[in-house]
Image (tube, helix red, strand yellow):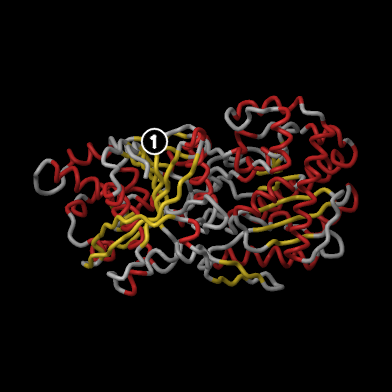
Amino acid sequence: MSPGIKIAYFSMEVGIDPAIPTYSGGLGVLAGDLLRTAADMKLSMAGITLLARKGYFNQKLDESGRQTEEPVIWQVEKHLQKLPNQVSVSIEGREVFLAAWQYLIKGPDDHEVPVYFLDADLPQNSEWDRHLTDFLYGGDSRYRICQEVILGMGGVRMLKALGHAEIERYHMNEGHSAFLGLELLDETAAKKGKGPVGWDDVEEVRKKCVFTTHTPVPAGQDQFPMDLVYNVLGKHDVLEMEELFSFKGSLNMTYLALNLSHYVNGVGRRHGEISKLMFGGHTIDSISNGVHAGTWVSKPFQILFDRYIPDWREYNFSFRKAMSIPSNEVWTTHMEVKKRLIDRVKQDTGMILDPEVLTLGFARRAATYKRPDLIFTDINRLKKAASTAGKFQMLFAGKAHPQDRPGKESIQSVFRAIHELKSTIPIAYLPNYELELGQLMTSGADLWLNTPLSPMEASGTSGMKAALNGVPSLSVLDGWWVEGCVEGVTGWAIGEKPPLWGLGPDPGVSQENRAEEAELLYEKLEKTILPLYYGNRERFIRM
């Protein structure tokens, strides 16, 4: 057990190992990278999350791209250490007991950052309560709000039970853990020996809390009707302080986190601007997301970097020296990784791809605003690019949330294109996207494709992982790519930076705009990228 933790990092999901399926996408993968970096920096920090005994889900795809889900069977005892401590929280008037499992992330000089996984599957609990930490983002609103009570309130109590009594900062990674603020308010009022929580207590709690908001998509902000809140939490002083948490008659977890934090940040410069518009009256800074280089650089490139940039793990700024690595070694290493990816495609789908053909990669959570099917807007135009400028092949991966019907339909739209283009452009959709496959795709593709509906991409770190492996991006100017794109040097932009629009619950995009963006994509692919790949390989390698 690590004594003296000063920073507690709360996240509903954490991605730290492919064998521990307690993450669904970028939010959890970022949390894992941040905690690894904390270990590298020797920070006095701990992560708090839920156990998710049955994971997110195993994805099954039929020939038409219809997604079905199965529980993930993983051996908790094999990967985590059970701790003897227990705490409890009150849910719907019941006392729900919680245990904790520990995973230690080791940095230099054996510095350890613990991650605590909260578990409600205890014999003292009712059958329904025992399953509250089974599924990541599972169930209905009642299930979700109970999970968030466990994460926020239970997490604070567990840290105290584990001996971490002097925590200086509570960091909320998205609003799921905002109930930790209510627990801290109760603690603060109790220490003063007074009755109801007051606004002076709120100010004290704010000094301890920071909040990172991740999404301009309304669906990413948990909201619960007040009757459900009262039923789950019971009578609570804070519930009378409506301006602290209430938004249009419901409990909005994002607003609760905003109102209980002295510092708030978005995850990219552009996302910071958008967040200020969304949450008027709140001061919101921006810190662009990053990725953990030691995790996302492929093994062949690690060996290459060790030879030419031996301090790259400790000092990521050293990557600027990569320009001195001989081009032939860069390309030989890339082709080694690419062939590994092509082998994985054959293993998973039976499709045989040509390693000499330009390969586009697209892998992320399957949500409509990510628009995996933008490139298929005009099939005939896409065929023309392939026939006139050079062959290319495409790889896709990504899970849709089980209750996200439009997200599932976006996968099916890719499958329709796969069938329509099978004699012209080879395309494969790899099932069950997870950390290991993500690392292989971002490092093995020749070109990373990203086509979100602007300005809905908060950051989007998959392109950063590709960049660490020398892979350039072709992306809409949204998220981090606004900062990362140097046209013709780090990759290529699809269109110009758009105005800040489309922040409502259904941002939408007109067919005319979609067609325009698709045409810009085709133009860049046909007139710039394919000619460079096949006609000036040396310059492509330098990129």
- In the displayed structure image, the side of residue 305 where residue 3 appears, left or right: left
Q: List the residue tagged with mark 1.
A: 44
Q: Give the quadrant of residue 147.
A: bottom left
In the figure, 92 relative to 242: above or below?
A: below
Compare residues 370 and 263 and report the one nearer the observer. 263
Q: Position of residue 33 (x, y in %)?
A: 53, 43
- The residue sitting at 41% across, 46% down in the picture is 47
- In the displayed structure image, the side of residue 291 where residue 378 appears, left or right: right
Three-letter amino acid code at the position of disc 1: Ser
Q: Position of residue 520 (x, y in %)?
A: 74, 45
Quarter the N terminus occupies: top left
Q: Position of residue 317 (x, y in %)?
A: 61, 26
Secondary structure beneath label 1? loop
Mark 1 crowd level (few <14, some 14–19, many ≥20, 10 Å Cα) = some
In the figure, 331 relative to 252: above or below?
A: above
All told, the count of numbered labels is 1
Q: Position of residue 518 (x, y in %)?
A: 72, 51
In the figure, 149 relative to 4: above or below?
A: below
Query: Would residue 351 be seen by someone viewing this image from the given angle?
Result: yes
- The residue sitting at 61% across, 70% down in the picture is 67
Query: Would residue 492 be seen by someone viewing this image from the given angle?
Result: no
- In the displayed structure image, the side of residue 165 where residue 314 appears, left or right: right
Quarter the C terminus occupies: top right
Compare residues 174 and 389 and report the one nearer the observer. 174
